[in-house]
Amino acid sequence: SALAIAKDLHPIAEYKLRDIAQSPLENKYDLLLCTEVLEHLPDPVKGVKNILDSSGPNAKILLTVPDGRIDTYEGHINFWSIESWEAFLCSHVNRKNIKTGYLKDEQILFGLLTLD
């Protein structure tokens, strides 16, 4: 239903519904967004790897997860603090420019990856 809303709002954009836990996208993209997904995956490293494998040479990737220090949702299986989030990204995303921080009144952690 979210894709239908997005297509209605921006009909000329290209949208893909994929399971990043399974495989990368077929094509390479310059902008990838992965919001509030990695905390649900049994293997978030594979999810990040598949996102990276779907990115073009100069891509920007935005990843977001809830702040694990305050996240109480029972459906989440991964929890990161700001420190462990940065360590997670730095240990699994080499050769990239990584910026991390807070969004939404320090409830959401972000990772912005710039591929150069």
Image: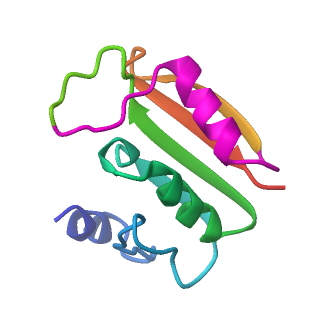
Q: Give residue 25's position: percent from left, percent from top.
A: 51, 77
Against 30, residue 64 (above or below) is: above
Residue drawn where x is 39% and y is 75% of the image: 16
Which part of the image, by quadrant, shows the C terminus?
bottom right
Residue drawn where x is 22% and y is 64% of the image: 5
> Is 70 left or right of 108, judged from the image as shown?
left
> Is 35 left or right of 86, judged from the image as shown?
left
Residue drawn where x is 59% and y is 83% of the image: 27
Is residue 66 magenta-colored?
Answer: no
Residue drawn where x is 47% and y is 28% of the image: 109
> Is 28 left or right of 62, judged from the image as shown?
right
Against 101, residue 94 (above or below) is: below
In the image as oriented, which residue stretches furthest toward the bottom? 26
Q: Quadrant of residue 108?
A: top left
Which part of the image, by quadrant, shows the N terminus?
bottom left
Q: Which residues are magenta?
A: 75-96
Which of 66/6 is in front? 66
Against 66, residue 18 (above or below) is: below
Q: Give residue 70's position: percent from left, percent from top.
A: 30, 15
What colouring style does the render use? rainbow
Q: Give residue 65's position: percent from left, percent from top.
A: 41, 35
Is residue 95 magenta-colored?
Answer: yes
How many circles with numbers are drawn on the protein?
0
Q: Give residue 12's position: percent from left, percent from top.
A: 43, 77
